[in-house]
Amino acid sequence: MNTPLSPAGLPGGAPAERIEAGRLRSILIGSAGNLVEWYDFYTYAAFSLYFANAFFPAQDATAQMMSTAGIFALGFFVRPLGGLVFGYLGDRHGRRVALMSSVLLMCFGSLLIACAPTHAVAGAWAPALLLLARLLQGLSLGGEYGSSATYLSEMAGSRHRGFYASFQYVTLIGGQLLALLVLLVLQHWVLSDAELRAWGWRIPFAIGAGLALLALRMRRDLAETASFEAARQKKKPMGGLAQLARHPREVLLVVGLTMGGTLAFYVYTTYMQKFLRLSVGLSDSQTTAVSAASLIFAMLLQPIYGALSDRIGRRPMLVGFAVLGTLFTVPLLSAIRQAQGPWQAFALIACAWLIVSGYTSINAVVKAELFPAAIRATGVGVPYAFAVSVFGGTAEYAALWFKQAGIESGFYWYATAVIACTLLVCWCMRDTRSTSLIDAEEAVAA
């Protein structure tokens, strides 16, 4: 007879202290790997101001940013494929296998960018190699989200699931923050501006490849979740599109929730750096400092909001985000556009994060609670990746297109309309805290 496992992957008879310690260790390691993945992915956005000319030399500044943003967006279009491939791995062979595979692929993508030849050396092959690297990273990240969201949600206990699962976005934001901190160090203490533009932009990608190998080593020791082990013992079909098709309502819920939330997230992360530089008129160093400070503020909000969802439920948090996002996106972006200096810009972006965190802090656990264990990694990853590729990955490019067309405020209204669609979804959905399939499965197993 098999010994039943606790949520932390320890024998069911283990003391509560050991179970909680094992759960916390697994969550920390899983989160650390997530941070490395997102550092690698966002390094592209953080340093694109410096390497755009190396790959697209015969364009003006805005056109260069549009070219790099276009490749950034194309990296998102392969994320549904990554969600499908790594979701299948996670549902059929274990969450740990999927997490290890995704971080290894991210390592290859970062290393390729670090070694990529410039346009002056390789001509048209240079942007082609850049695109290939971003496609590899997009595949990796498409699998990382569903796998890590599933792993953290299954590892967390029911009482604090929102709090623990919020660390996915703590580390997601932390990855982008780490990329910006590397940029700050290189800007102010290591390299001149000319050196950074000539070759220094390669350094953070090399660092990311090394960190990915470290994360791979850490993830080798992860315990598998009890939810996956219980589902595997039932010997029923696990993962794949055929199984996912049996949950159309849940798939549409994930798409509807993600479209407004991911657009808002990418507006105040990847695009905001360009917005502060090209529209507000801050210097490079001011742009980096404001972006870093706002990300620190956002990172601190995530566990607070996650813990709040454990007390009041997930739905009120999501409805609050969608209502406030619909009402205040245009006023906030308009005010940031007119900001008088970095401090005012930071204060306004912080106000935006008070709204957006209602989505980011709990979106992973909400989606994981919708699906049964046999299809959870695929169910979370594939529809999420589809919505992100359509609305999140194109956010920066769409904003720059509106700017180049001379109607920058049109993007503000576009973002408002998308968030309003998410409001309709949030308003009509049930609260997943009270209908969680993770809790139902654990109750049956117990």
Image: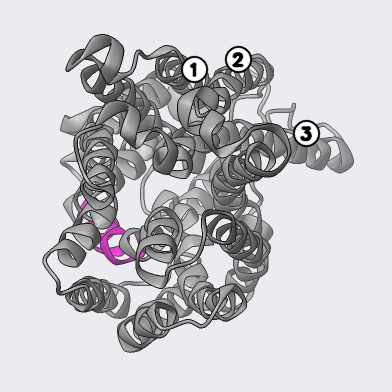
From the viewer's side, name the closer residue of 215 and 66: 66
- Answer whether residue 250 is visible to the viewer in this image: no
Q: Is residue 46 above or below residue 161?
A: above
Query: Closer to the observer: label 1 or label 3?
Result: 1
Residue 345's spot in the image, x, y percent? 53, 76
Instruction: Please say if the residues under marks 1 and 2 sit with CB atoms less than 8 Å apart.
Output: yes
The overriding secondary structure of the stretch rendered in magenta is helix
Q: Which residue is mark 1?
A: 107
Q: Secondary structure at mark 1?
A: helix
Q: Which mark is residue 213?
A: 2
Type of residue at label 2?
Answer: Leu
Instruction: Please say if the residues under marks 2 and 3 sit with CB atoms less than 8 Å apart.
Output: no
Q: Is residue 116 above or below residue 80?
A: above
Q: Quadrant of residue 139?
A: top left
Q: Which mark is residue 251?
A: none
Query: Closer to the observer: label 2 or label 3?
Result: 2
- Answer whether residue 120 is visible to the viewer in this image: yes
> Gap in Å between the C-alphas at discs 2 and 3?
23 Å
> Gap in Å between the C-alphas at discs 1 and 3?
27 Å
Q: Which residue is mark 3?
A: 22
Residue 86's spot in the image, x, y percent? 36, 25
Q: Quadrant of residue 265?
A: bottom left
Type of residue at label 1?
Answer: Cys
Stretch of the chain drawn in magenta? 251-261
